[in-house]
Image: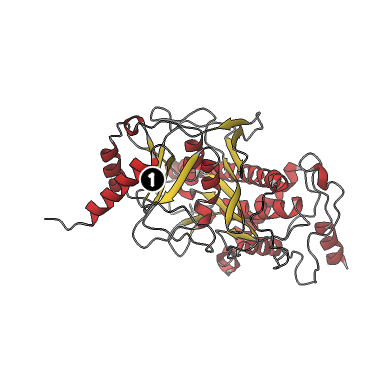
Amino acid sequence: MASITAVARLVHINPSSKLNPSLISATKPLFPFFSLKSSYYPIVSSSAASLTSSRAMSYDKQLIAAKKAASLASLLCQASFSIYLSYLIARKLVEMIVSELNVQKGLLLSDVQSKSDKSPVTVADYGSQVLVSFVLQQELPSQAFSLVAEEDSGDLRKEDSQETLQRITKLVNDTIASDGTYKVSPLSESDVLTIIDCGTSEGGSNGQHWVLDPIDGTKGFLRGDQYAIALGLLDEGKVVLGVLACPNLPLESINNKNQNTFSKSGCLFYAQLSCGTYMESLAGSPPVKVHVSDTKNSEEASFFESYEAAHSSHSLSGSIAKKLGVKAPPVRIDSQAKYGALSRGDGAIYLRFPNKGYREKIWDHAAGYIVVAEAGGVASDASGKPLDFSKGRYLDLDTGIIVTNRKLMPAVLKAVQDSLKEQALPSL
């Protein structure tokens, strides 16, 4: 009976009045049923609920919920990094004092793990995904919920991951409690695992699907550099809104002189179909409408590329830049923060050319795509075809991704295709 009471307290929640006034009176349970085996059940999209089509409609409620979810997740990430940084400082001091002693130095090393593709995943990645899923379902209780997200709970269910799961659970509950919006009983470890696995939707061309990268740029996050919480919404396979929370990106423009400067408040970019792109600080400054660079002279353009050479071919980007006559050195930063910076005109071109055989995931581009598109930009693959998010969890691409303004796209596309042809020619 106690567990049933706890479940009832969890699922009968009123959304925050300051975030979504129209839903204040909503008391419909978030989950349609429950059992004693688990206290958390996601709403699963049905074919009837998914018949939204691509008709003209407002996504205001979803945008409000998305901004709330991404902002709260950014607070969790910042808290997690502060803990991680304190650990690194403490470990360095220990190493300086007892460097010759055989002591245990891996106190928080389990906060950073490796996935099957060797990419890192942290406590913050999991915690961010839990928070975003949790907030979306609290704020939009009457809507069918489908989430395509990067993480799953497989590794966390292993016996040697119990300590990590405990830290994730504590971090999530502490963030929810400090925010104060949701008056709920603390989530259990079982709840956390179940919420993480709400992100296993395959997406597709039918219905609405949220698309989430809980921390895009995990390596940047671990270095203390750029990363983003990237959240988009698909409706019938089309991206209709996107939010990028970039905790380390300053409100002022970044360039080659100050690309490593940071803001204490960070940036929040958001866009809705046919409504433009806006930027505000994560601390809540008034929103400002942004627009991509309108330069048509490629020699004056600067371009973004991935910080990690393993994520995109720097040599190919260099060849393309040379053909375009670009004089400025590339701006290399992690994550979809590049899309945000491009949307406000910090640079004019973003080039991404992963290693052969790599398949782009939709969560790495969905939110950034609409943020740039609504700011007047355009994105395509290397053949000039628009990005298609309707095929499931992966993008079906030709070679790479090009993002720029409409004036530059023809010249950039030609330079890309010429460089790819040269790269394919055998050496003489």
356 or 120, nearer to the observer: 356
On screen, residue 162 above or below 60: below
On screen, residue 311 above or below 115: above
Q: Quadrant of the C terminus?
A: bottom left
Tell me which colouring the rendered structure shows. secondary structure
The residue singled out by tag 1 in the image is 351
170 or 42, nearer to the observer: 42
Q: Is residue 4 visible?
A: yes
Looking at the image, the residue that sits furthest to the front is: 55
349 or 38, nearer to the observer: 349
Figure quadrant of residue 206: bottom right
Q: Residue at point 58% right, 65% down?
A: 202
Q: Residue at point 67% right, 55% down?
A: 133
Q: Is residue 104 left or right of residue 382?
A: right
The percent coordinates of residue 278 (x first, y second) are 60, 35
Q: Say what amino acid the circle numbered 1 marks.
A: Leu
Total numbered circles: 1
The percent coordinates of residue 386 (x first, y second) are 46, 52
On screen, residue 236 above or below 292: below
Q: Is residue 152 left or right of residue 12?
A: left
Figure quadrant of residue 279: top right
Q: Quadrant of the N terminus?
A: bottom right
Q: Secondary structure at mark 1?
A: strand
The percent coordinates of residue 34 (x first, y second) are 80, 69
The percent coordinates of residue 65 (x first, y second) are 70, 47
Q: Is residue 287 left or right of residue 183?
A: left
Q: Residue at point 78% right, 57% down?
A: 142
Q: Residue at point 36% right, 43% down?
A: 410
